Image (cartoon, rainbow, N blue to C red):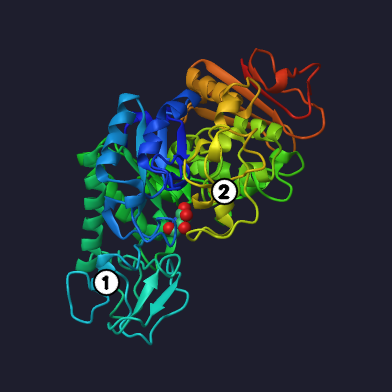
């Protein structure tokens, strides 16, 4: 079990390409992040998840790692990363890096060596069949195969895009008579696992506080029920507990019961798979736009919550991330505020995707950049102020990593919003402060659902003798409901009031009972 710091944290996700460019090359960098730490702190966030920053050809925005031990030149140097850790710790903040555990880039030296016909140290680092003519369909946790283009006679399993060959952690269930599928405890898979620990050790020794693990459930192949992958992570957790007891690992798994059993401190609900998370914010009729249903989401969520660590394991409902459409694509600014009242009062640790605190837009119609495809519109440069390129970079606009939301950045930017008490930014800041003042609102405090059928959404958080009621009505209708609302209103969106048990349309209340 990792450091206590996680339970009280509020995370900010930084997509480093697009956050702050300090050397006018049009791409964000680590020095830029260091410059902006006070901004993140002022919002109230005290932890950061930074998307991949290691050396990479950037076919998938850095999720295709070439060298796990080296910061990508575009972000500068390992020394800069070390300075970032130190600067964050001095401000009482924590940093987790993105750990791409399941695959590398095809340009990774391990893969190049593994493509050679002669046996060498890396021959079994990846999942290979025994001949290039063998590339079987429907193998669990394998997305496809690389075939040809190298001298080794075999097909290499792919974990995501074809430029991302799968590392070999072995097969949980092997086909009878199949020689190329290795067991999880064979030499090749065990050496891959040892290397993964080395990578973690290297960065933890440099001062990082943990990792968000990419595709955490994908490691062991043909793994029904994920038992092989769970055991693998349990081994890593044991090692972490021994060597780095404060380190935090958060999984991109989307199945909290498995992920927490595997030893992760927290799992994300994801925008794909069985979660129904898009129903909240991102379908054609999202619940928080006032004309949708959250029932399927909560059926899954409550079930998962009950299965995790006696009902108080950490499950994160993020505001968004670099893989999803931004909130502002489907919600109005007021609806975003109500969504934040939800995100910042739910159990689990909040993760705010950079720019969501401003209501930054999804930029429509962009060409794909570095494997972004539809995701590119959610990866546009941060809007800081009204200066050139919204303060993101001094490079010419044509050189920016991704084009900006030029039509709106005069209104939607950090400087303007910080000066406007009614901005989304200030709303988010107030909500974070409230969360941090009240133990009932922290990650593991108790949660009791009162109503999620239609509107309003009503739930209770509690800790010790403190009880807080949250009532959210994103719908367009005033609704009469006796929610037992007596108490001190800690927060009311747009100063609305509950009178005669009528919950006004488009309202949010946080009430201390
Ligand atoms: C999930 C990451 O969030 C996404 O951006 C990436 O493309 C895939 N994993 C592959 O690593």
N-terminal-most mark, 2 or 1: 1
Q: Label 2, label 1: how many angstroms apart (C-alpha)? A: 33 Å
Residue receiving disc 1: 112
Disc sitting over residue 266 in the figure:
none
Q: Nearer the viewer, residue 353 or 193?
A: 353
Indicate whether 277 appears above or below 33: below
**Residue farthest toward the top in the current orientation of the protein:** 488
* Residue at the spot 50% in from the left edge and 26% down from the top edge: 43
Provide residue 33's location: percent of width, then percent of height.
40, 36
* Residue at the spot 39% in from the left edge and 66% down from the top edge: 164
Total number of numbered discs in the rendering: 2
Provide residue 244's location: percent of width, then percent of height.
23, 38
Using the rendered view, name the quadrant where residue 241 is placed: top left
* Residue at the spot 31% in from the left edge and 60% down from the top edge: 66
Residue receiving disc 2: 378
Q: Is residue 208 left or right of residue 311?
A: left
Provide residue 499's location: percent of width, then percent of height.
79, 16
- Around disc 2, counting alpha carbons within 10 Å, would you say few (fewer than 14), some (14 to 19), or many (20 or more)? many
Q: Is residue 495 left or right of residue 257?
A: right
Query: Which quarter of the rendered picture does the C terminus lie within?
Result: top right
């Amino acid at each position: 079990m990792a450091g206590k710091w996680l339970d009280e944290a509020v995370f900010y996700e930084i997509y480093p390409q697009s956050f702050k460019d300090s050397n006018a090359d049009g791409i964000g960098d680590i020095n830029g992040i260091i410059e902006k730490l006070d901004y993140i702190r002022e919002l109230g966030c005290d932890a950061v998840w930074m998307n991949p920053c290691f050396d990479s050809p950037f076919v998938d925005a850095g999720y295709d790692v070439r060298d796990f031990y080296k910061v990508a030149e575009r972000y500068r140097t390992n020394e800069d990363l070390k300075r970032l850790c130190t600067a964050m710790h001095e401000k009482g903040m924590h940093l987790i890096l993105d750990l791409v555990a399941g695959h590398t880039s095809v340009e990774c030296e391990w893969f190049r060596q593994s493509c050679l016909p002669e046996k060498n140290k890396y021959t079994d680092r990846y999942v290979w069949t025994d001949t290039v003519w063998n590339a079987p369909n429907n193998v669990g946790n394998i997305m496809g195969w690389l075939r040809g283009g190298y001298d080794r006679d075999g097909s290499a399993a792919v974990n995501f895009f074809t430029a991302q060959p799968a590392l070999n952690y072995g097969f949980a269930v092997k086909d009878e008579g199949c020689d190329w599928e290795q067991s999880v405890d064979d030499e090749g898979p065990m050496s891959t696992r040892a290397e993964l620990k080395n990578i973690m050790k290297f960065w933890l020794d440099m001062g990082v506080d943990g990792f968000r693990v990419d595709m955490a459930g994908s490691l062991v192949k043909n793994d029904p029920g994920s038992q092989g992958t769970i055991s693998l992570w349990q081994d890593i957790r044991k090692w972490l507990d021994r060597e780095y007891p404060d380190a935090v690992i958060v999984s991109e798994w989307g199945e909290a019961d498995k992920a927490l059993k595997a030893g992760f401190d927290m799992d994300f609900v994801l925008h794909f798979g069985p979660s129904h998370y898009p129903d909240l914010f991102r379908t054609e009729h999202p619940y928080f736009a006032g004309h949708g249903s959250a029932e399927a989401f909560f059926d899954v969520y409550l079930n998962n919550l009950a299965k995790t660590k006696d009902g108080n394991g950490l499950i994160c409902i993020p505001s968004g991330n670099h893989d999803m459409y931004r909130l502002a694509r489907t919600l109005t600014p007021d609806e975003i505020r109500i969504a934040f009242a939800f995100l910042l009062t739910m159990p689990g640790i909040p993760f705010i995707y950079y720019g969501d605190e401003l209501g930054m837009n999804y930029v429509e119609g962009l060409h794909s950049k570095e494997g972004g495809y539809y995701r590119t519109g959610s990866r546009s440069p941060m809007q800081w102020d009204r200066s050139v390129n919204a303060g993101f970079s001094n490079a010419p606009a044509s050189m920016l990593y991704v084009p900006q939301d030029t039509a709106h950045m005069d209104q939607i930017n950090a400087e303007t919003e910080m000066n406007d008490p009614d901005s989304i930014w200030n709303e988010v800041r107030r909500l974070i402060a409230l969360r941090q003042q009240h133990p009932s609102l922290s990650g593991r405090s108790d949660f009791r659902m009162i109503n999620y059928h239609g509107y309003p959404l009503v739930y209770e958080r509690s800790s010790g003798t403190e009880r807080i009621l949250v009532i959210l009505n994103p719908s367009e209708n005033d609704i009469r409901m006796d929610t037992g609302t007596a108490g001190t209103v800690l927060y009311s969106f747009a100063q609305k009031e509950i009178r005669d048990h009528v919950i006004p349309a488009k309202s949010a209340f946080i009430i201390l009972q």
